[in-house]
Amino acid sequence: MAASATKAVASRHVATGPGSLLERKLWRLGLRDPADFIVHLPLRYEDETHITPIMSAYPGAAAQVEGEVKRSEVQFRPRRQLVAVVEDDTGSLVLRWLNFYPNQQKQVAAGKRIRARGEVRGGFGGYEMVHPRITAADTPLPQALTPVYPTTDGLSQVSLRKAIDQALARADLSDTLPSEIRDRYHLMPFDQAIRVLHHPSPDISYSQLIERGHPAWTRIKFDELLAQQISLAAARAARRRQRARALKDDRAGLTQALRASLPFALTTAQERVIMEIVGDLSRSFPMHRLLQGDVGSGKTIVAAFAAARAISSQSQVAIMAPTELLAEQHFQKLVSWLEPLGVTVTWLTGSLSSKARKVAIESIESGKAQLVVGTQALIQDKVNFSNLGLVILDEQHRFGVGQRLDLSRKGEESEGSLDMIPHQLSMSATPIPRTLAMTFFADLDVSVIDELPPGRSPVLTKLVSDARRDEVLSHVITEVRGGSQAYWVCPLVEESEALQLQTAVDTHARLVLALSGMRVGLVHGRLPASEKQQVMQDFRIGSIDLLVATTVIEVGVDVPNASLMVIEHAERFGLAQLHQLRGRVGRGSRQSVCVLMYQSPLSAVARQRLRAMYETADGFEIARRDLEQRGPGEFLGVRQSGQELLRFASIDTDALIAERAREAAGELRDRYPEHARAHLDRWMRGRQDFLRS
Ligand code: ADP
Ligand code: MG
């Protein structure tokens, strides 16, 4: 998709404001053109196609009854309420309103014939309906199930239905799939699928409709996934047409100098991925590469090489981390690696004082800052780079799609009319199975570090019941006496951040008491940034022996002298999280231990998780089991999975449809470009932009 086309689509949606109140509400739902309405599909349906005799209505089910109002009165006990009794040939039913308007009272005046619809419940005086919907009796019954649509405040189902039906009458429902493809995958024609879903006849299986297993749903999901696949391919092609600065000089000899200054030799895997990255950087279209490597595999130094290369080619580099703690640590490392080689490294996070912030921003804008390390603050609007050539995202899975998008726009702005896009390198320790990545991810190339630096002995993992807490404490003492350091991770309290914080503070206090003479520090997310930095610095230089921490230390923290990790209530953590936490130790040459304390009894799932931790230290194997236990949707997290672009299909249940859609996408593009274009027009409607991130 050319950038200009994308913009044209987007601007269609903001060009003119909507007129009437109804239009404004519809707009809020994203409904403007007939094409928007036809794919605004029901959440569920109500069956109003027949009248239930009162005798056959039973509690727990919705029913529609018709009859004469026998009695109608406002009662005051136990509170003010409107009560009416409706009767047909088979029996009678109480209708009850706990609050009501005068006109409702008129609707059910004694002697009127009415139709009432609602859920039947057992009451004191027999069956009743609370707040039923009343319509006039003896009007024709609908022939199809009544759709219930997703709606917004103040927009009734009746108005929404009417608007959708009007749009359906006007909309173009022509098929965007050639019949050859439709036949091959046994897909229902588009117009038929749309009509079925908006107005299903009552003989269609309700569960197939609701669980989206009906062929009409299959067609819709296929279409949606197909659009996604076509856009992914188009995004890739578009990226190749975009321009980026080719970063191929190493005039300053920076990478050579960096290599020479390191106290260790790079692993073969590190060398290989550096080559892949350098290859991408030297091309004149933007790199989009994901670097995967298990915790501790040494991704940061790879990032430093990429940065050195870009800086050597006279470009600025931005490195972004999801937490301040991690950004700070990167900053220190990069300073120690690159400043001696003459590189200016700047630091920018949200918590800088306004004066320091101003200085940082000036040096970024002037181009003096060659390497900028920071948090999300880097993508804030006020920061303009002078010549940003490379953007590096660490722990990429922690960033949302929207944020990643903003960052890649930064470079566009800084180059003004030249329309240059910065190269982008993302790093993640969460391995994504290849097929999953290909099916659901934005346009990405993948590099993998599949080897740990030498000399690491695997972390010994112990499962210890809470009851043996004292033993764990003496283990901490022994370890610290032997000159190493330890982490103590506080239990996770999902429900409340305040409670989580309190738990951390309490845990710290208890440990200080229990371990007198030991230097015990505390770090958590709510600590002011400067204190956080101070604590981490103290731990790094060894003036704290035991660091009590929340999961703020989960990602990236690197203190090689720490050789013991205790995780309290390990059963509350997810597998990936436990693996990340355990990855904080085993970074030095000393034998490291990870103690997973748990509270009995364990649920079956928790037991499985802890066993996986005990049985393997391989991040890819852990990810495989994690995927098995949680399913791909949860595993990937909706934010990065592209699921947010999918309204109807699901990563978890529609893998097979996705596979077919991927197959068909290539064919449609090559053999039926007109169809492909029409298909995208129908399905993407201005959202293509997201796929660039
Ligand atoms: P991660 O991939 O988890 O981000 P880091 O980049 O934090 O890993 O690296 C973990 C530790 O390993 C760091 O202390 C780093 O300096 C060290 N390291 C990286 N590469 C090597 C290597 N080739 N040989 C020895 N140590 C290395
Ligand atoms: Mg890291």
Image: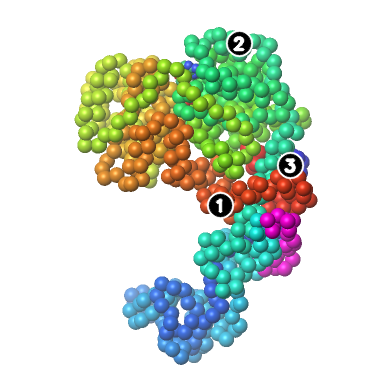
* Residue farthest to the right, as pictured: 674
Return the residue nearer the eye: 238 or 676: 676
The structure residue drawn at horizontal position 58% and vertical position 37%, both measured from the top left corner, is 403
Query: Local crowd at mark 2 within 10 Å, few (<14), some, or many (≥20)?
Result: few
Q: Which SS class for mark 3?
A: loop
Q: Which SS class for mark 2?
A: helix
Query: Local crowd at mark 1 within 10 Å, few (<14), some, or many (≥20)?
Result: some
Whole-angstrom CA distance, mark 3 to mark 1, is 26 Å
Q: Amino acid at mark 1?
A: Asp
Q: Which mark is residue 138?
A: none
Whether ligand 1 has any atom under 8 Å from the Cβ at mark 2 is answered as: no
Per the image, the residue denoted by label 2 is 256
Per the image, the residue denoted by label 1 is 654
Instruction: Report the magenta residues as a range.
Output: 164-184
Q: Which SS class for mark 1?
A: loop
Please check the rendered image and state whether residue 182 is part of the magenta-colored stretch, yes or no: yes
Q: Quadrant of residue 50?
A: bottom right
Per the image, the residue denoted by label 3 is 1
In the image, taking residue 282 as reference, residue 465 lies left or right, namely: left
